[in-house]
Image: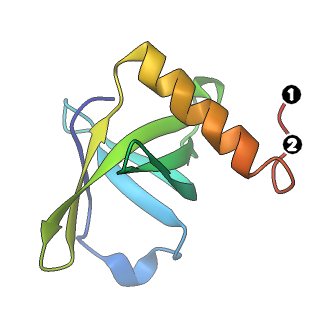
Amino acid sequence: MADMEKELNNPAELDDDIIVLEDEEGTAVTFQFLELITVDAKPYAVLLPLDEGDEDMGVVIVEVVDLGMESEHYDAVVDPDLNDRIFAQFKKEFSDKYDFE
C-alpha cells in the first residue's frame, strides 16, 4: 500500500491504536497500530490490517513522516530489504510482547 495518509474525518470514534489509512486508489483500510520503531534514525509504524479480506496480508510497515502541526503522512516501505530489516528489528525488540510464528 503505497503513499497512505491518516484519515482524520472522525478521530473521536477511533480507538487510540486504530487508524484508518487511504490506499493509492482511495480505499479506506483499517489497521491496528502495533508499535513505532526507529531504524536508521527514521520512525516506522508496524500496522496490522483489520479489514475483512486483509488478514492474510500480514503486518504492514510504513514510514512516519512528520508534516508539522500534529499532522503525519505514512509512506509504505516498498524496498523488500529495508522492510525485512525493520521487521527483524521489530521482532527483536518486541519478542516478549508478540508471538511470532
Secondary structure of the residue carrying tag 2 is: loop
- Residue farthest top in this picture: 80
Q: Is residue 64 above or below residue 71?
A: above
Give the side of residue 89 with respect to residue 96, left or right.
left
Please give left or right for residue 31 compared with residue 77 in the image.
right
| Quadrant the N terminus occupies | top left
Q: Which residue is mark 1?
A: 101
Whole-percent x and y of residue 41?
36, 50
| Amino acid type at mark 1 | Glu
Spatial separation of the CA atoms under disc 1 and disc 2: 6 Å
Residue type at mark 2: give it: Asp
Q: What residue lies at 51% left-to-right and 64% top-to-bottom?
A: 18
Q: How many marks?
A: 2
Disc 1 secondary structure class:
loop
Residue at numbered disc 2: 99
**Which residue: 53% across, 35% down?**
86
Residue drawn 34% across the image and 77% down it = 11
Residue 53 pos. (x, y %): 57, 29
The percent position of residue 21, horizontal first and vertical second, equals: 33, 50
- Specify the color scheme: rainbow
The percent position of residue 77, horizontal first and vertical second, equals 36, 30
Number of other residues with Cα within 10 Å of mark 2, as a class: few under 14, some 14 to 19, many 20 or more: few
* Figure check: 70 above or below 38: below
Q: Which mark is residue 71?
A: none
> In the rendered view, would you say 15 is above or below 18?
below
* Residue at horizontal 64 percent and vertical 24 percent from the top: 56
Q: Does 79 sit left or right of 51 as displayed?
A: left
* Near-viewer residue (66 or 93): 93
Residue 16 or residue 95, whichever sits in front: 95
Quadrant that contains the C terminus: top right
C-beta proximity under 8 Å, tags 1 and 2? yes
